[in-house]
Amino acid sequence: MAGNNNSRTMRINLKVWRQQNEKVQGNLVDYTLDSVSPDMSFLEMFDVLNEQLVKKGEEPVAFAHDCREGICGSCAMVIDGEPHGPQTGTTTCQLHMRSFSDGDTIVVEPFRAKAFPVVKDLVTNRTALDRIQAAGGYVTVSTGNAPDGNAIPISKEIADLAMDAAACIQCGACVAACRNGSAMLFVSAKVSQLALLPQGQAERDRRVSRMVWQMDEEDFGSCTNMGSCAAACPKEIKVENIARINREYAHAMLFGRVSERVSDE
């Protein structure tokens, strides 16, 4: 709920998911903060909550964070049912409390997906995305010395599309937003950023087949083109990338080694 808050502090009611580990049942726990500044980031508000819990001798809420600059994608929270919160193109750490109003009740949960088991509280294990990336998201071509910047002409349109796809920070919001728990937007972005460029052509078919196979191995759901993934993406990765990965996979099916596994060489 977006707020228009002119007061110096706010009272915020929180319902926070608490879970010791993936093997035990979790539940929502109520907390209240009485002096929240509208200028606080969402994570700073959680810092205040944890300071209060520690003073009371209670266990602080576990949540993931690193750069707090919208770069790393670690700050994965579902806020009022929306991955990263109500603002579009924004990570949790960039969300500020002025987006809420005095007296609001905010429900905070971890990213929900079968492939993202809960480590503790709001922290999930998203290394499945790392394994997909490692399965084929790279080039092995030897470039030798650094070439001149204009040695391989690339149109601005193609360069922009590749850079837009490369903006993916691998946070997993697309998976959490998808009702099927699909990772297609993430995988399509990683495939697109290399498939669009001449440097990525040598391993084009092998890359897409290995990444799609690994995605299936990690037990992500199927894509049904609902578009909720792109709506939740903090870097606004376009859903058109999913159409591109489908074309890339079709090309690999016709001309490449679609059945290749990560362990195959």
Image (cartoon, rainbow, N blue to C red):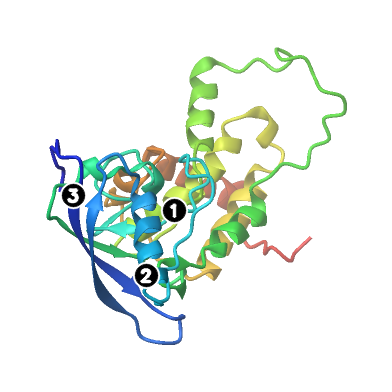
Mark-to-mark CA distance, 1 and 2: 20 Å
Q: Which residue is mark 3?
A: 10
The amino acid on which the numbered mark 3 sits, given as a three-letter code, is Met
Whether residue 72 sits left or right of residue 222 in the image: it is right
> Which residue is more in the foreground, 188 or 27?
27
* Residue found at the very far right of the displayed protein: 144
Q: Which SS class for mark 1?
A: loop
Write the residue at 39% across / 53% down.
173
Q: Which SS class for mark 3?
A: strand
Q: Which residue is mark 2?
A: 53
User: How many marks overall?
Assistant: 3
The amino acid on which the numbered mark 2 sits, given as a three-letter code, is Leu
Is residue 221 in view?
Answer: yes
Q: Which residue is mark 1?
A: 75
Report which quarter residue 261 is drawn in. Answer: bottom right
The amino acid on which the numbered mark 1 sits, given as a three-letter code, is Cys
Is residue 257 in view?
Answer: no
Q: Earlier in the sequence, mark 1 or mark 3?
A: 3
Q: Earlier in the sequence, mark 3 or mark 2?
A: 3
Whether residue 147 sits left or right of residue 107 in the image: it is right
Could you classify mark 2 by the number of other residues whose Cα lies within 10 Å: few (under 14), some (14-19), or many (20 or more)?
some
